[in-house]
Amino acid sequence: MVQVTPLGRKEIKAKDLLRQLQLEAEEQRKQKKRQNVSGLHNLDVGNNQLRELPAALADCPRLKEANFKGNQLKDKRLEKMVNSCQMKAILEYLRAGGRGKGKAESGREEARKKKREKQQRKDGVDGEQDELEEASKLLVKVLHVSENPAPLVVKASPGVKDVRAFIVCCVLKGVNLKPGNALKRFLSAQSLDVGNNQLRELPAALADCPRLKEANFKGNQLKDKRLEKMVNSCQMKAILEYLRAGGRGKGKAESGREEARKKKREKQQRKDGVDGEQDELEEASKLLVKVLHVSENPAPLVVKASPGVKDVRAFIVCCVLKGVNLKPGNALKRFLSAQTKLHEDICEKRTAATIATHDLQLIKGPLLYDVQPPEELKVTPLGRKEIKAKDLLRQLQLEAEEQRKQKKRQNVSGLHKYLQLLDGKDNYPCLVDAEGVVISFPPITNSEKTKIRKETRDLFLEVTSDTSLQICKDVMDTLILKIAELNRVTLENKEDSGSDNESDTLSGPGNLNPSQNVQPLVVEQVRVVDTDGNLKVLYPSKTDLTTVSSLLTVIR
């Protein structure tokens, strides 16, 4: 039998030395493994034959998710926690020593506990007792679903999986927003949901929350029925304006606070050189449009788009605008001049989009947005006789050459500027009414048949583009704003009804009804569908007219 005396050790048999070295190596591997485990974030040891969980897991501060299910643990209390996925409770239980542990395991746990306490004192961290005392000051009580007689339930549809799959909700009761500026601080967020509560009125302080963009007040039985109607139709901006103006159904104390807030705002506005709130409300009341939805319209106008327009001039947006007053003085002249300026500016000289305006009473629907060969397309241009599109373009080109010779310059005016927009096209776009009459030939001209006159009250508006649908919508938004502004100018000036040659001078007060000052223009939604009836565009939709929302109040 060979005996050796290793360095730093006593004399020992070689066989026993090897066994001892193996045991020490195994212990080193275990220690190293334990150290590596401490950095775990996720752990899955489910469906194994584990009888107990190692206490070393309690020293894994980064461990957030773990699966221990499917193991036959000796500790039934621990197994119950595992089956109910109480991750935090499992770690606390292991940290406290659990049950069914041997003395050696309990000793190691005690050593770990002392080590943690020593480290906390070294780093200046408050002890566990201080943490518990601090926690006692911020208490929340959990009411379990089984104890709640009327729990709120949220159903998730399968469609959210591919969009925004995860949602977590809860109900928090007992919040006190009355003291001081508690409500204002609470509403520094951009959204608020107090739907389906027992609110009888909305606090006027909401009007002083500039960041509030989205709010849900539905499901409350508000005393103010006008306000409740705004809530149900999701008119967020109108709600805040209404509360800012004082609303209805306010008590004396609430009215007093509102009056104080109003004076404070007016003082700040004078200091900053900003117009008073009353002026803003008056301005908003003059620029009003009301949207009439397709579902509320007994005879909505529909535009069918043929497949051929895709390769020629693919995009079209239409709507009906009612309540326009073009009769007094220069109203019609200003209207046509504004349209020309829009063609030069936002339409980029008709290269981005083209506007066409028609007298609604002279249109017979449904309409067809189509393409036709130049030699077949017949149109009656404004101020001209019926002519084929091919001949019209040739005639306009000759007129353009004559203009250049007479004025001795390259620039031309009128329709002649847009002839090159149809270069290389085998087919030309057109809008055709139910009688087969071409009422629009974009981007060149409208038809004399639907020409707007001083007596016109209701308009059919169309915007077409070969660039994008969004450009059409942006141009339409701007066109409606411009018409609303012109209508306001007409009503403010109170011009007398002029003749067709339209004098530039303003007359004295006319016979306009004063109620006209607050009557909003009505925008009727128009659907553009394909030949099978499938919806392509609806204007104005909920997202339209937002680009001009700072200047135009939209009642939806």
Image (cartoon, helix red, strand yellow):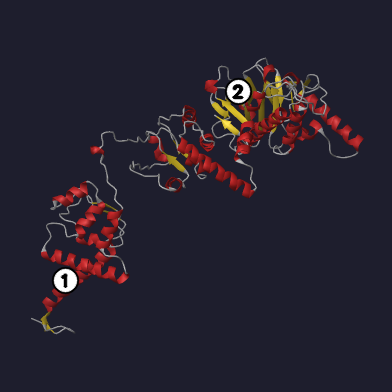
> Mark 1 = which residue?
23
> Mark 2 = which residue?
304
Hey, which quadrant is residue 404 in on the image? top right
Give the position of the C terminus as an image quadrant. Answer: top right
N-term-proximal mark, 1 vs 2: 1
Could you tell me which secondary element the residue under label 1 belongs to?
helix
| Residue extending farthest top | 435
- Against 517, is 191 above or below? below
- Taking depth in this image into account, of 50 and 217 the one nearest to the observer is 217
Q: Specify whether residue 312 is in view.
A: no
- Against 27, is 478 above or below? above
Tag 1 near tag 2, CB within 8 Å: no
Could you tell me which secondary element the residue under label 2 belongs to?
strand
- Taking depth in this image into account, of 28 and 148 the one nearest to the observer is 148
Give the position of the N terminus as an image quadrant. Answer: bottom left
Hey, which quadrant is residue 388 in on the image? top right
Q: Residue at x 60, y 36 (%)?
A: 281
Q: What type is the residue that disc 2 sits on?
A: Lys
Q: Position of residue 386 (x, y in %)?
A: 78, 19
Q: What type is the residue that disc 1 sits on?
A: Leu
Horizontal relation, residue 8 to residue 433: left or right: left
Q: CA distance from mark 1 to mark 2?
A: 86 Å
